[in-house]
Amino acid sequence: MTTTTNVVRVLSGGAAAAVVKAVQAGFEAQTGARVDATYSAVGQMRDRLVGGAPCDIVILTRALVDELIESGHVVAGSARSLGIVKTGIAVPAGRPRPVIGDRAALAAAFRAAREIYFPDPEKATAGIHFMNVLKALALERELAAALRPFANGATAMAAMALSTASPVIGCTQETEINYTAGVELVGSLPREFELATDYTLGLSTRAPEPALAQRLAALVAGPASEAVRRQGGFDF
């Protein structure tokens, strides 16, 4: 028997945090239910769902949602794309913007930085990709002392905004840059290193509140959130 909790629990990658928050107040006012959302690296959120954490909605990469459908953790047919997000380079607001247009320029920008902020290199999509870029540039050992990993991109960007070092630089999903106060998007990674991620919503097969989850999903992935998604850098 399904227990009614009147709480809709969301496990989401940080890239979609602002999207959920944008519709949360309206959803809660309309339904009387409460949204309890956790935002962190997509791999960590996947692990929490698989580990049995209470969950109604997940927002992860398309690949992870497809895996969870295959494993029976996400309802088949419930996947809805929020849009494509690129991975970009950021600096604290008002700081000089480095040139990052090609391999050599990107390497020079990383070498010049005293601190480099990025999300979890093992669980976060952008963090894993960032480390692969450093390895492709043969910089992972040279720059080890400058690396500043955080649990997710939003936390990394918030920390970078407070840094007094100069110069500093960050790399994460562009939504996490655009939605974080105190940092500015320099641009997307050069085409050679481009990463575009399809952030996708799915309904948990063990959702305690399936009906409410469907209502929230319609807001998060539908017209109600289009403006905030476009503003943040989602392409759809």
Image (cartoon, rainbow, N blue to C red):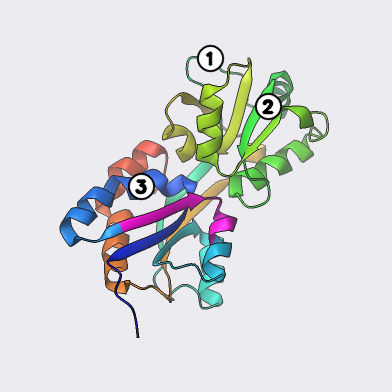
Q: Is residue 223 visible?
A: yes
* Along the line of sight, the residue nearer the viewer: 21 or 15: 21
**Residue assigned mark 1:** 95
* Along the line of sight, the residue nearer the viewer: 167 or 188: 167
Q: Are marks 1 and 3 in contact (CB under 8 Å)?
A: no
**Residue assigned mark 3:** 19
Q: Is residue 173 visible?
A: no
Which residue is the extreme one toward the bottom?
A: 1
Mark 1 vs mark 3: which is more N-terminal?
Answer: 3
Residues drawn in magenta: 35-45
User: Label 2 amino acid?
Assistant: Leu
Between the residue at mark 1 and the residue at mark 3, the CA separation in whole angstroms equals 27 Å
User: Label 1 amino acid?
Assistant: Arg
Instruction: Say whether residue 177 is left or right of residue 129.
Output: left
> In the rendering, at what x and y percent does residue 70 appear?
55, 76
> In the rendering, at what x and y percent does residue 105 appear?
69, 23
Tell me if residue 124 comes above or below residue 139 in the rendering.
below
Mark 1 vs mark 2: which is more N-terminal?
Answer: 1
Residue beneath the point at 45% across and 39% down:
175
**Residue assigned mark 2:** 106
